[in-house]
Image (cartoon, grey):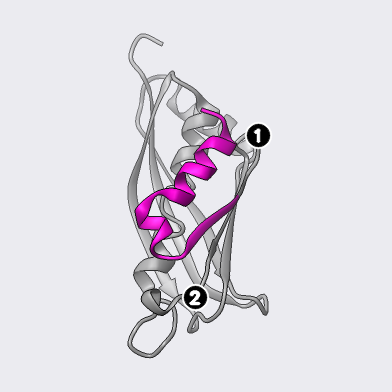
Amino acid sequence: MKPSILRHGLNLWPPFLFSGIHVTEITDDWRRVRVELRMRPWNRNYVKTHFGGSLFAMTDPFRMIPVLRCLGPDYFVWDKAGEIEFAKPGRGTVHAVFELDDAVLDELRAAAAGGEKVLRWFEADVIDEQGDVVARTRKQLYVRRKPGR
């Protein structure tokens, strides 16, 4: 699947569509993803800031999918764990950027070369329109080379 098709599909996917999450960019090489969360009456919490679940959901698949696509069909890639730390109330449109470089991919390939499972943490911040960090997220991925590959 092309990144542009996945981007459009995710933007129409009900959990993202109805929570105000919008994928604005997935590069053709899968190395950069940008996601926004737009404030809507139905995604605000009791004190009229972004609902924490929506802040975490906007970051959920954007470590696993690029790593899976870049490593290719010889690898299993799964989300293993996730964490979020709220830094300040989120209002308006917030965004997160996920970037993946060759050094990380090389590290994962080398660590999984013998068929061992590899657990690696990735971090991403959710940023508001003023450039302030609203939340810090961490996702742990499980990576393993498929047997016989």
Mark number, residue 39: 2
Task: For label 2, count other residues whose C-alpha is less than 10 Å away and answer few (under 14), some (14-19) or many (20+).
Answer: many
Which circle's residue, 1 or 2, is located before the other in the chain? 1
SS of the residue under disc 1: loop
Mark 1 and mark 2: span between their CA atoms? 28 Å
Q: Is residue 7 above or below residue 144?
A: below
Within 10 angstroms of label 1, few (less than 14), some, or many (20 or more) residues? few
Q: Amino acid at mark 1?
A: Asp
Label number found at residue 28: 1
Secondary element type, mark 2: loop
Q: Residue at x 46, y 39 (%)?
A: 65
Q: Residue 14 is drawn in which quadrant?
A: bottom left
Quadrant for the C terminus, please.
top left
- How far across and how far down the image is residue 118, in percent? 39, 35
Query: Image quadrant of residue 48?
Result: bottom left
Where's residue 15, x and y in %?
35, 56
Pointers 1 and 2 in contact (CB under 8 A)?
A: no
* Residue 93 image position (x, y, % from top left): 57, 73
Q: Position of residue 96 (x, y in %)?
A: 57, 61
Residue 41's disc is none
Question: Which residue occupies 33% across, 88% down?
Answer: 46
On screen, 72 above or below 124? Answer: above
- Circle 2: residue type: Met
Task: Name the residue nearer the viewer: 100 or 61.
Answer: 61
| Rendered residue at 50%/36% (across/down) | 67
Q: Nearer the viewer, residue 117 or 35?
A: 35
Magenta residues (range):
1-24
Instruction: Looking at this view, name the residue that lies furthest to the bottom.
Output: 47
